Image (tube, rainbow, N blue to C red):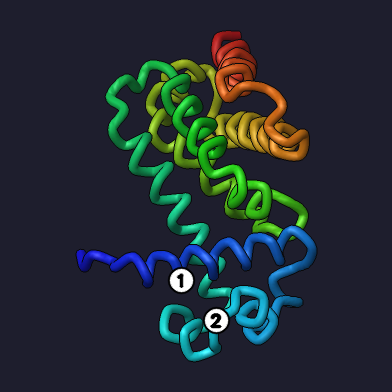
Amino acid sequence: MKKIDRRTKYTLDVIKSTTLKLMEKKEASKITVTELCKIADINRATFYKYYVDIYDLIEKIELELYNSIKKSIETIEDEESIKPFINNIINIIYENQDACKVLFGPYGNKEFIKKIVYLAYVKSATEWKRKLEKYSTDQIDYIFNFFAFGSIGIIENWIGNNFLEKPSEISDLIVTLCDNLLNN
């Protein structure tokens, strides 16, 4: 992998942060490259050197966060509990507050947060199936969706409340609710 020099890193950070600020106020479809470049104080050629369009930029912001979360949970060996997975996801969301406020906010991609929650499920699917052995595969899918959308609601509420609670409090809440579901 090629090392990025300081100037390039600075430029990419400015483009990213400007995009996130704009997305706090409006949908991606309403953001133009011209507007972004004017606010970021870069020229269009610089933008197009790194990105095809606004959607490509947003996709790369999402991918960076997704890969960060995926990498952190791939290192977890304890698949008996969802706690380490949820802890890692919540901590990374907390560490990336600016991006998450936008990506999980009203103008973000609703499928993106589902994709993140699904990472924990895939990693702990064997344990889910063991604990829910009395249920059919279809029922397990329903239960997972109940868990996923409930977790998403908690995370979105936490983000909407400007990360008022500690990450450990949110993680513990999700894990407790999920464990209660899995153990009944």
Residue on which the image places disc 1: 11
Residue 147: x, y in percent? 63, 29
Residue 133 versus residue 39 in the image, above or below: above
Left or right: 61, with 166 as reference point = left
Identify residue type, mark 1: Thr
* Element at label 1: helix
What x and y, as percent, mark residue 111? 62, 54
Quarter of the image where one finds residue 155: top right
Expressed as whole percent of the image width and height from the top left, the position of residue 43 reads 54, 87
Quadrant where the N terminus is found in the figure: bottom left
Q: Residues within 10 Å of mark 1 (few under 14, many from 20)?
A: some
Tag count: 2
Residue sticking out furthest to the bottom: 45
Residue 150 higher or lower than 184, as above or below: below
| Image height of 81 relative to 43, above or below | above
Q: Quadrant of the C terminus?
A: top right
Q: Is residue 181 visible?
A: no
Task: Out of 111 and 26, give the one closest to the viewer.
Answer: 26
- Mark 1 vs 2: CB contact within 8 A: yes
Q: Residues within 10 Å of mark 2 (few under 14, many from 20)?
A: some
User: Which of the two discs, 1 and 2, labels the residue nearer the N terminus?
Assistant: 1
Query: Residue placed at 66% from the left, 86% from the top?
Result: 34
Who is closer to the viewer here, 166 or 75?
Answer: 166
Separation of marks 1 and 2 at Cα, in angstroms: 8 Å
Give the residue pinned by disc 2: 42
